[in-house]
Amino acid sequence: MPTDAVLSMAEERERLQGANPAADLKFFLGRQPSKRGRKRDLQWFRQEEARGLLVACRTLKPRWFAFLLVSFGGGLRWGEATALTRADIDWRRGRIHVQRTWSESGGRLERCKDGEDRWVTVPVSTLAALQAHCEAMDLEATLNAWTPDQRQLVFPNSVGGITRYGAFLELVWQSLLRKAGLPYRKPHAMRHSYATWLLEAGADLRWVKDQMGHASIAETEGTYGHLVRERHERHVEALDAALGSVSEPEEADGTRESFDSRRPAASPYVPPGTGRPLSADQSGRESMVEGKGFEPSTSALRTPRSPN
């Protein structure tokens, strides 16, 4: 390479000093889970499955019953529920202040994901279970002489500290799934269940976004938006109540003629060039379009090509 060209390239690099945004993008993309991994992680419980899991928890691990209810009834991440303190519960308004999470890798409390605090409204049954749980923990704290800091934790372990995720999986979660006869799912599936149930019940997507603590509504829609499409399509049928009575003509006696009664009777289908109608069975095979009623097949409607 000519010397002048080498000097020119060196000068260009000197002029464009700074971080390489493409390198950062490559690093970011490399950390994303595969499509199969994202599909596998996005699992939730049907409501009857959740009830079975909760029954098993109340029988086998009653200490964790309120914890599961908070995860199912508030959509909290595992670390967020673990980091809850007594001051985070607004008993009068029936809500929980989610503002920190437990970092398993760092072994410390941190600000919650996305740096956003949020108030999560929880069901009355969850609030009642929380109250009973806190009363039980108060008795245990008195018997074991816990410190004031230990008494502030909503879900302490038996020595007044924070339970590690691995211990929860091995000692609590896996045994509950086996007891309930359910296939394995991560604890995060309780959070997915919360969002799924809300959307299927007709909750507004923007409100669910705030409850979940997502950074944007695009994140909520991209993760759960497909769950509400069928529900919205079913609502179209409800328009009959508002529009159907108007669109149907009124008879002389004051009654209205339904659309089905005005539907023309099916006429025998005569294929071109045959000169004779087909039977009902034959015409059905030729012209039925699944889910749409009777229409002539496209091959029957095609006109002969010109010799030219």
Image (tube, rainbow, N blue to C red):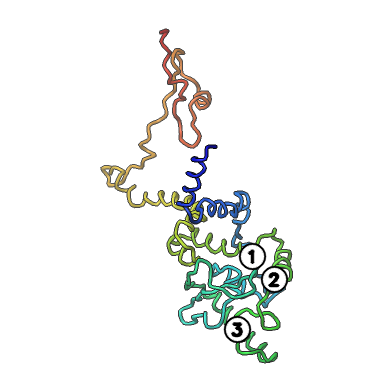
The answer to which of marks 3 and 1 sits earlier in the sequence is: 3
Residue type at mark 3 is Cys
Q: Are marks 3 and 1 in contact (CB under 8 Å)?
A: no
Name the quadrant of the C terminus: top left
Number of other residues with Cα within 10 Å of mark 1, as a class: few under 14, some 14 to 19, many 20 or more: many
Instruction: For marks 2 and 1, give the CA distance.
Output: 10 Å
Looking at the rendered structure, which numbered label has been put on residue 134?
A: 3
The answer to which of marks 2 and 3 sits earlier in the sequence is: 3
Number of other residues with Cα within 10 Å of mark 3, as a class: few under 14, some 14 to 19, many 20 or more: some
Q: Are marks 2 and 1 in contact (CB under 8 Å)?
A: yes
Residue 233 at x, y = what percent?
44, 49
Q: Is residue 303 left or right of residue 179?
A: left
User: How many discs mark residues in the rendered view?
Assistant: 3
Instruction: For marks 3 and 1, give the CA distance.
Output: 22 Å
Looking at the rendered structure, which numbered label has been put on residue 168?
A: 2
Question: Where is mark 1, residue-wise?
Answer: 187
Q: Is residue 177 left or right of residue 242?
A: right
Residue 215 at x, y = what percent?
47, 63
Residue type at mark 2 is Phe
Q: Against 306, is 199 above or below?
A: below
Residue drawn at x 47%, y 51% is 229
Number of other residues with Cα within 10 Å of mark 2, as a class: few under 14, some 14 to 19, many 20 or more: some
Residue drawn at x 60%, y 82% is 153
Q: Nearer the viewer, residue 18 or 60?
A: 18
